[in-house]
Structures are given as structure tokens and as C-alpha cells.
Image: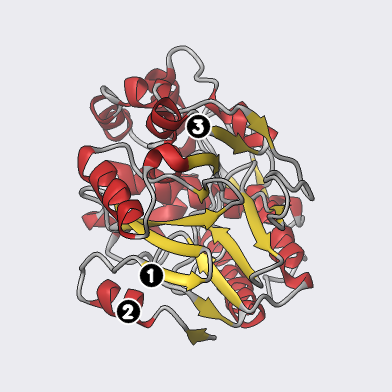
């Protein structure tokens, strides 16, 4: 893998906002800050159309983010009123947040995958369901109840997110000719995550699916189901069919060598699966929470606050569910998770 966004990498290392850059003729990266977040910024990409612009992602809904977006577009000779489309890789706040405001100002159509649109239906009693979900994973009532306060203002922000005007399926070309941008469905990080291939400029917009340095969070959210890690691993194969001239992620910096980065991500998850399976074998009947507390994180488990612990438990649960799908572990029925290894099955290679 080779870093091509050198200025972006330098800004990442110094914890600054990178500059607006022309990536190709008619294609620019516009960094939009994420307030009080270790990811720091979302790289919004502006694509010139025959008339106006299309954006890939929109950025976080905050005034400082809005100013950075509008100033960045002005610096390349455009205004928000010139935006005709917002193609959303996925419906997280740092990607979808400003889409509603952009649409209000410009009339732009917001596009996303149908599976992603389905995640924007908020069930009643969401905060209480998070507490129930965490206690089933093995959290104490006190640990789980910390989430209620955190989610107090979350509903309003969620309900303000833009719902799609345009549903984008795998293989669709959602922009008008002569734009040559094709959607690639890459579920895992979210159910409807999309990457976009610009065939004319030989680049791939990878959203959070493939980042140059960190592994995207693959977790099972409260109320979620299925095998999102299995989906993610399969999706890595989906993007391996072609080697774009440059990879344009939503965070950190641009790079080349998609195949090498894909192999590194696969290796990371093989290691994590083996670690999770070893934890279950060492402590039969352990809850997901207990397994998560033993795994290697970027900081000690005791230093993780409520938000990061919920993410960690969700990611651990995704790995355990994938191990269960592989027939390596089993979760006993009951009010709380109780994981046991399947005897006679070797650990993950």
C-alpha cells in the first residue's frame, strides 16, 4: 500500500484539518470536521457534472462542519446551491448528517442503498432497548443504564437525518451521463454500505469499508441480526475484482494498493476471531461483555467509556456470531449470553 494523500496523512499525524485538494480534473476532496470525535473529519468528495456537482457523502451536521463544506466548495468555484446529488456511502451521522441541509438549500437528490434506508426507521423505546440488549450481552444494569443519558439527545438528531430521494442498488449508475460512477454494495460496516467506482477517473470511493490505517467497526447494533462480519469479509472480495488507480476513503488519507489493504483487513479479522475463540475456550459460559473485556483494544478496557464499550461489545458480538456460523462456538439460550466452544473443532487459523 502506498499513501497518495501525503498532505492528508501529514494533517492526520499533526491532528489538523487537511486542505481541499483536486484529486483529478473535476474531482476534489473537501474535509469536513467531526466535532469532538477521534475520526476528526469526513472527506467529502465533490464530482463535477455536466451541470453542477455531485457529492459523495455530506459530513456531520454541525455549524463548523457546514462552514467547512461551504468554504471548501467556494474555494473550487462552486456553492452548495450547485449540488445536484448527494450519494451517501452509509447512514452514519458523519456521512449523512448535512445531507438534509444541503437538500434544503439546493434541492439535491439524496441517494443510498435500500438496506441503508431501512435502518432509518427508529423503533419506539430505543434507549430502553439498548439497555435490554446490553444486559443480554452480559452488562450490569448500572453499566447498561449509562446509555440512557448518552442517548437523551440522540433521537432528535436521528430523526433530522435525510431520508433518501433515490434508492441506489448494486451496479446502478445514479448520476446522469456522461458521469461514469457505478455503485458497489459492500455490506458489513452497515447493511447498505455502498462504495462507488468512477470508471472515467479510475478511482474508488470506499466510504468506511476500506480505510488506510484502521479497521472499520463491524458490530451488531441493538435490534440488529444476521452475520455482519461474514457480510464484511465477503464484501472485501467484492471490491477485489478491480484494482483502482487510487482509493478515496472517507477518513484519514488517499492511497493505492487496494488488494494489499484488503489482505491486511482479512488478516486482522482472522487474528481477532482467534482471540475471541481463545477467550471462550478459556472461560466456558462467558458472556459477550466478559469476552470483550479480555480482548485487545486501542486502550485498556477500564479506560473505555460507555460509548466505546457499547461499540466494543457490539464488535465482539459480531465476531462471536461469525464463529457460531462457522460452527466453532455456541451461545446457550437464556436471559444472558453464555458462550462455549464446540469441542473437537480447531481454533481459527
According to the image, label 1 marks what residue?
Answer: 21
According to the image, label 2 marks what residue?
Answer: 7
Vertical comparison of 269 with 5: above or below: above
Labels 3 & 1 near each other (Cβ < 8 A): no
- As measured in the structure, the alpha-carbon distance from the residue carrying label 3 to the one carrying label 1 is 38 Å
Residue at the farthest bottom position: 2
Marking on residue 222: 3
Query: Residue 130 sits in which quadrant?
Result: top left
Rendered location of residue 45, percent (x, y):
47, 57
Q: Residues within 10 Å of mark 2 (few under 14, many from 20)?
A: some
Marking on residue 190: none
Q: Residues within 10 Å of mark 3 (few under 14, many from 20)?
A: some
- As measured in the structure, the alpha-carbon distance from the residue carrying label 2 to the one carrying label 3 is 38 Å
Query: Residue 225 sits in which quadrant?
Result: top right
Q: Is residue 36 left or right of residue 105?
A: left
- Give the camera-side residue of 5 and 136: 5
Examine the rendering and report whether any part of residue 15 can be seen.
Answer: yes
Residue located at (20% from left, 68% from top): 16
Residue located at (51% from left, 48% from top): 53
Mark 2 or mark 3, which has the lower sequence index? 2
Looking at the image, is mark 2 or mark 3 nearer the viewer? Answer: 2
- As measured in the structure, the alpha-carbon distance from the residue carrying label 2 to the one carrying label 1 is 9 Å
Examine the rendering and report whether any part of residue 341 can be seen.
Answer: no
Looking at the image, is mark 3 or mark 1 nearer the viewer? Answer: 1
Amino acid at each position: 500500500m502506498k499513501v497518495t494523500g501525503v498532505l492528508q496523512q501529514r494533517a492526520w499525524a499533526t491532528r489538523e484539518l487537511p486542505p481541499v485538494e483536486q484529486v483529478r480534473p473535476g474531482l476534489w476532496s473537501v474535509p469536513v470536521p467531526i466535532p469532538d470525535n477521534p475520526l476528526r473529519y469526513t472527506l467529502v468528495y465533490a464530482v463535477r457534472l455536466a451541470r453542477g456537482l455531485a457529492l459523495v457523502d455530506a459530513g456531520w451536521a454541525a455549524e463548523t462542519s457546514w462552514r467547512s463544506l461551504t468554504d471548501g466548495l467556494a474555494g473550487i468555484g462552486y456553492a452548495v446551491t450547485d449540488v445536484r446529488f448527494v450519494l451517501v456511502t452509509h447512514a452514519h451521522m458523519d456521512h449523512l448528517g448535512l445531507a438534509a441541509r444541503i437538500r434544503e438549500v439546493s434541492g439535491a437528490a439524496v441517494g443510498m442503498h435500500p438496506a441503508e434506508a431501512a435502518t432509518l426507521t427508529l423503533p419506539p423505546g430505543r434507549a430502553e432497548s439498548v439497555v435490554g440488549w446490553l444486559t443480554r450481552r452480559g452488562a450490569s444494569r448500572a453499566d447498561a443504564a449509562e446509555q440512557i443519558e448518552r442517548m437523551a439527545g440522540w433521537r432528535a438528531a436521528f430523526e433530522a437525518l435525510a431520508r433518501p430521494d433515490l434508492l441506489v442498488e448494486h451496479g446502478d449508475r445514479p448520476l446522469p451521463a456522461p458521469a461514469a460512477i457505478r455503485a458497489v454494495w459492500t455490506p458489513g460496516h452497515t447493511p447498505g454500505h455502498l462504495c462507488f467506482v468512477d470508471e472515467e477517473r479510475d478511482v474508488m470511493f470506499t466510504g468506511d469499508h476500506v480505510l488506510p490505517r484502521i479497521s472499520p467497526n463491524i458490530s451488531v447494533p441493538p435490534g440488529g441480526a444476521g452475520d455482519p462480519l461474514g457480510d464484511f469479509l465477503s464484501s472485501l472480495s467484492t471490491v477485489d475484482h478491480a484494482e483502482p488507480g487510487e482509493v478515496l476513503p472517507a477518513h484519514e488519507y488517499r492511497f493505492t494498493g487496494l488488494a494489499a489493504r484488503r489482505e491486511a483487513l482479512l488478516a486482522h479479522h482472522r487474528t481477532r476471531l482467534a482471540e475471541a475463540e481463545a477467550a471462550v475456550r478459556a472461560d466456558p459460559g462467558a458472556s459477550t461483555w466478559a469476552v470483550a473485556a479480555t480482548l485487545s483494544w486501542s486502550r485498556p478496557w477500564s479506560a473505555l467509556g460507555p460509548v466505546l464499550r457499547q461499540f466494543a461489545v457490539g464488535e465482539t458480538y459480531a465476531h462471536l456470531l461469525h464463529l457460531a456460523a462457522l460452527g466453532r462456538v455456541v451461545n446457550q439460550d437464556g436471559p444472558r449470553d453464555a458462550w462455549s466452544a464446540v469441542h473437537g473443532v480447531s481454533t481459527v487459523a
